[in-house]
Image (cartoon, rainbow, N blue to C red):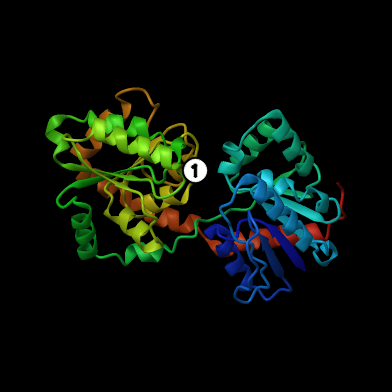
Amino acid sequence: MKVLFIANPESIYIRKLLENLEMYDLDYEVYCCGKFLKRNFQCKKLSERLLVNNKVGKIIKFFYFKKCLMNFKEINEYDLIHIHLLDWQSLLFKRIYNEKKLIVTFWGSDLYRLPRSKIYKFLQKSILKKADFITVAHEKMIKEFYKTYNIAKPVYVTPFPVPTDFRKIDRISGVEIEKYKEKLGAKGSIIVTLGYSGDPGKNHKYMIEEVGKIKENLKKKIFAVVPMTYGGSKEYIEMVKEYCNEKLEGKIKYKILTKKLDEDEVLLLRKATDIFVNVQISDVCSASMQESLYAENVVINGKWLDYSEIQEQGGYFETIESLEEGKLKEKLEYVINNLENLKEKTKVNKAIISNRNDWKKATEAFLKIYKKAMNTPKKY
């Protein structure tokens, strides 16, 4: 069986899935098609055709895609096409979806945040109608799928665990944490991390403003970290810097992270963090949220972000009802005043997060869909 992935090979999630597919002694050849064509190269045991990102203008990107399509003229060599992230780039491959079995997988943000113009939805639906199988990462996304697209097709769950090696978090020593805090300028402080990227959807302005309002007697105890290491434009990052200067300078010590962090640095930040704030617009069990829970941070989550599944499994985190003025400030003050006791409550999260992220089960779920697709006549 040959599977053509319409996906971004630079995604750690895609690479993790491919690595796990390698472990099965099956006749699989997986090809990846990235967002923009730059060069082809071989990767590990799989016969992967990796097309790597290239930062060029929109017009040039279009021509890269045209070239990319030429690479797949021999479409008959593939048995199955699997789209990960149904964005505008995936739409350009539309002509090849008629001929082969097609699977479309939604991860989370691609279902909740992609542009929903009438034209865009029409184009997405034109592909979804051709799909033999549609899958989502979490059961609770099924309802959102039907609400968004109103397509009467069965939707299956293929869980997408986070690609984190949680054992690395366990191996971080107290000495390493203290050295990291000293490097940040946060020695002896409670670290409050605000979000995890430069994406404007994280609601940075609200978080920064609320932290700046914390009671005077508590301000000396905390150090705010604002990660802006990916996902934000230069203009937005500059705006956040100016806002921090306006609202926090002289009140609370803080550090804005702008340089890209490797996995070890990310996990060190998670372990060094005492309180993690997640009040973004939408979220479906993000890797950063799960890493923070595993690292025994006291997490403050927006109630509108559905993590009820973790609570049902016995997990612990704090919530705020809304982005109303004062809500986050009050919650932060409560957590800071009761940090030692609340830290004890976080210990239940480690086993829950570990059990949720089983790549063996996830890979087998995809393989089950592939086999089912191959044994089902093309309908659409």
Residue type at tag 1: Glu
Residue at position x 49%, y 43% in the image: 309
Q: Nearer the viewer, residue 317 or 12?
A: 12
Nearer to the camera, 327 or 143: 327
Horizontal arrangement in the rendering, residue 305 relative to residue 160 (left or right) = left
- Residue most extreme to the top: 325
Judge whether 234 appears above or below 72 on screen.
above
Up the image or down, 377 lies above or below 278; here it is below
Element marked by disc 1: helix
- Residue 155 in the image, given as x and y percentages of width and height: 70, 44
Find residue 166 and report its horizontal and vertical position in percent. Answer: 41, 62
Where does the N terminus fall, quadrant-wise?
Answer: bottom right
- Residue 45 pos. (x, y %): 63, 77
**Neighbours of disc 1 within 10 Å: few (<14), some (14-19), many (20+):** few
Q: Residue at x 83, y 64 (%)?
A: 74
Q: Between residues 23 and 361, which one lies in front from this camera angle?
A: 23
> Can residue 56 be seen here?
yes
Q: Is residue 319 visible?
A: no
Q: Where does the image place residue 286, in percent across and percent down from the top left? A: 48, 47
**Would you name the residue on which mark 1 appears?**
309
